[in-house]
Image: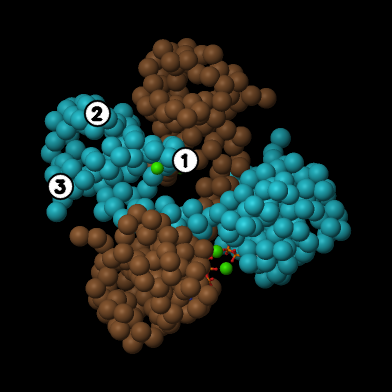
Chain colours: A cyan, B brown
């Protein structure tokens, strides 16, 4: 059975969720007070309606309680975001994801029972800032406060060395889990694999160790 | 030598970049037309000034050309974002990262020479939507259009099996690169390691194969 989603608020964040879910074949109801936005998503979502989510009658008449997951992606109007979440909760919606504007907003949302609270701009700001500091880190996945998987651009100093030459595991306590080489992905590269300039190394380990490795081989 | 950054626009995205860079010990100049925002970041950034970045004189007097990397995080005012980028380019700033509102905006920015163009709300919307579809995918790092590293919650069906029992590599062509078990991270787990309920598996492989594995072991 297909899961049914509803997205309230078709800004850039809500709009992207709506499009991604629809592209993946999910049923999506899109709701916004702004008719232009609704028209824009009419061909993307399964249904798109003009409506104010702070109006309980509107949500009821859309049968919102029958949806598996409702996403509240209202931005600047924090009151509308909170009120919408309260109504969804009262109507018995099981999974509610809400975009928070700041920490206070997030606290209120958590107290009134939002199931997932997200901070898209803040989180993306962190990711991008972290990759700007380093000359070689392109992207990363945080595994814990102290461990990550990072995409590192191979430096000129690394190029030409095999993984045995570099002896990364023993010397730095980190592992290369894959190498991106133009269009190819080499998963679990052999110890005899030699690094080429422009390779992107997918490295797993403790952040301090990854930093140590990165700095050791940084080109000047 | 410390890198010097300037952030234009202290919304949630620009503000988060400013804070992350500052937390990491970078020199950051924060600029916004809104005095309240500037006051908010006065204690976060190295310097925070009220100023309109579409005014060439303002940027010149701040010595903007001497910064290593300037981030334009102006949102709704697309014209101001474009004009600011043009001026930064003319003044000879080497690295310019700009937040885009939509694809048209991104095209213009790319034509006028922005070095990095980012879509924080869109990208985060995609990530979050993808994790909402699956019951087990928590987060992921895209390696290519077809390969990813994903954090998968181990299902009840998996629990109690060792990695040899599951024979994941041969049967699904994917690898478990790490296991998150409460506070621990087990990197490159042994074949004899047995999966516990609640483990988070860090899996690398082709998206189709990861999906196949996920669906095969999905609890009902
Ligand atoms: N009560 C409401 N009911 C339905 N839609 C609403 C309501 N209030 C606001 N919206 C819609 O939510 C959408 C997102 O709001 P807004 O643009 O303020 O957020 P934002 O955080 O700047 O968005 P983004 O950063 O994702 O582009 C808008 O299209 C707005 O019309
Ligand atoms: N010409 C300008 N010079 C300096 N700052 C500006 C200029 N124009 C806009 N700003 C500032 O940019 C910041 C971000 O703009 P805005 O709030 O429209 O973006 P947003 O995309 O909704 O932000 P976010 O989603 O990151 O919260 C605001 O604080 C605004 O005052
Ligand atoms: Ca906004
Ligand atoms: Ca935004
Ligand atoms: Ca980390
Ligand atoms: Ca992918």
Chain containing the residue with disc 2: A
Marks 2, 3 in one chain: yes
Residue A45 seen by the camera: no
Residue that label 2 marks: A169
SS of the residue at dot 1? strand
SS of the residue at dot 3? loop
Chain containing the residue with disc 1: B
Residue that label 3 marks: A156
Q: CA distance from mark 3 to mark 1?
A: 28 Å
Chain containing the residue with disc 3: A
Residue that label 1 marks: B140
Q: CA distance from mark 2 to mark 1?
A: 24 Å
Mark 1 lies within 8 Å of ligand 6 (Cβ measured): yes
Front of the two marks 2 and 3: 2
Near-viewer residue (B54 or B170): B54
* Number of numbered tags placed on the structure image: 3
Q: Quadrant of residue A165?
A: top left
| Left or right of A24 in this view: B107 | left
């Amino acid at each position: 059975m297909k899961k049914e989603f509803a997205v309230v608020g078709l800004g850039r964040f809500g709009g992207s969720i709506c499009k991604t879910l629809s592209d993946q074949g999910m049923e999506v109801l899109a709701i916004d007070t702004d008719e232009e936005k609704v028209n824009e998503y009419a061909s993307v979502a399964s249904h798109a309606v003009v409506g104010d989510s702070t109006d309980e009658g509107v949500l009821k008449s859309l049968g919102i309680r029958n949806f598996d997951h409702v996403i509240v992606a209202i931005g600047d109007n924090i009151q509308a975001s909170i009120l919408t979440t309260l109504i969804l909760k009262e109507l018995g919606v099981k999974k509610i994801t809400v975009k928070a504007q700041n920490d206070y907003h997030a606290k209120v949302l958590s107290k009134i029972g939002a199931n997932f609270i997200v901070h898209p701009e803040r989180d993306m700001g962190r990711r991008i800032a972290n990759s700007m500091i380093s000359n070689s880190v392109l992207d990363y996945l945080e595994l814990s406060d102290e461990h990550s998987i990072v995409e590192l651009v191979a430096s000129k100093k690394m190029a030409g060395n095999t993984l045995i030459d570099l002896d990364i595991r023993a010397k730095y306590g980190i592992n290369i889990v894959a190498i991106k080489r133009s269009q190819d992905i080499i998963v679990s590269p052999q110890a005899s694999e030699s690094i080429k300039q422009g390779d992107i190394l997918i490295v797993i380990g403790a952040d301090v160790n990854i930093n140590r490795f990165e700095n050791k081989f940084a080109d000047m």
